[in-house]
Amino acid sequence: KNNIPVAVDQTFATFYFQKPIELGVDISIYSTTKFIGGHSDAIFSSRIFNVGFESLV
């Protein structure tokens, strides 16, 4: 209605269990260090954008 982008931090509810883009979120941010990295010996992150929001990178 107001064209306000919605962003969500998916660090603890990982993309395996919840898919925020499918729920209507525009930007989804993950700290993949905690779950995908495993031992916190590396630093990773991921940003997932809905169609039309790629220019925010």
Image (cartoon, rainbow, N blue to C red):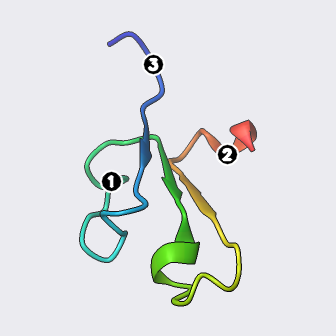
In this rendering, the answer to whether 24 lies above or below 30 is above
Q: For label 2, count other residues whose C-alpha is less than 10 Å away and answer few (under 14), some (14-19) or many (20+).
A: few
Q: For label 3, count other residues whose C-alpha is less than 10 Å away and answer few (under 14), some (14-19) or many (20+).
A: few
Q: Residue at x 51, y 89 (%)?
A: 38
Badge 2 is on which residue?
54
Give the x, y percent position of residue 8: 41, 43
C-alpha span from label 3 to label 1: 16 Å
Which residue type does callout 1 highlight? Pro
**Quadrant location, the N terminus:** top left
Counting residues from the N terminus, which is met first, the one under dot 1 or under dot 2? 1
Counting residues from the N terminus, which is met first, the one under dot 3 or under dot 2? 3
> Which residue lies most toward the bottom here?
39
Give the x, y percent position of residue 55: 73, 39
> Element under label 2?
helix
> Element under label 1?
loop
Which residue type does callout 3 highlight? Ile
Give the x, y percent position of residue 41: 67, 86
Question: Which picture quadrant has residue 6?
Answer: top left
Q: Are marks 3 and 2 in contact (CB under 8 Å)?
A: no
Residue 20 marker: 1
Which residue type does callout 2 highlight? Glu
Give the x, y percent position of residue 2: 39, 10
**Quadrant location, the C terminus:** top right
Q: Residue at x 50, y 75 (%)?
A: 34
Badge 3 is on which residue?
4
Counting residues from the N terminus, which is met first, the one under dot 3 or under dot 1? 3
Q: Nearer the viewer, mark 1 or mark 2?
A: 1
Q: Residue at x 70, y 82 (%)?
A: 42
Question: Which picture quadrant has residue 47?
Answer: bottom right
Q: Nearer the viewer, residue 21 or 36?
A: 36
> Element under label 3?
loop
Residue 56 marker: none
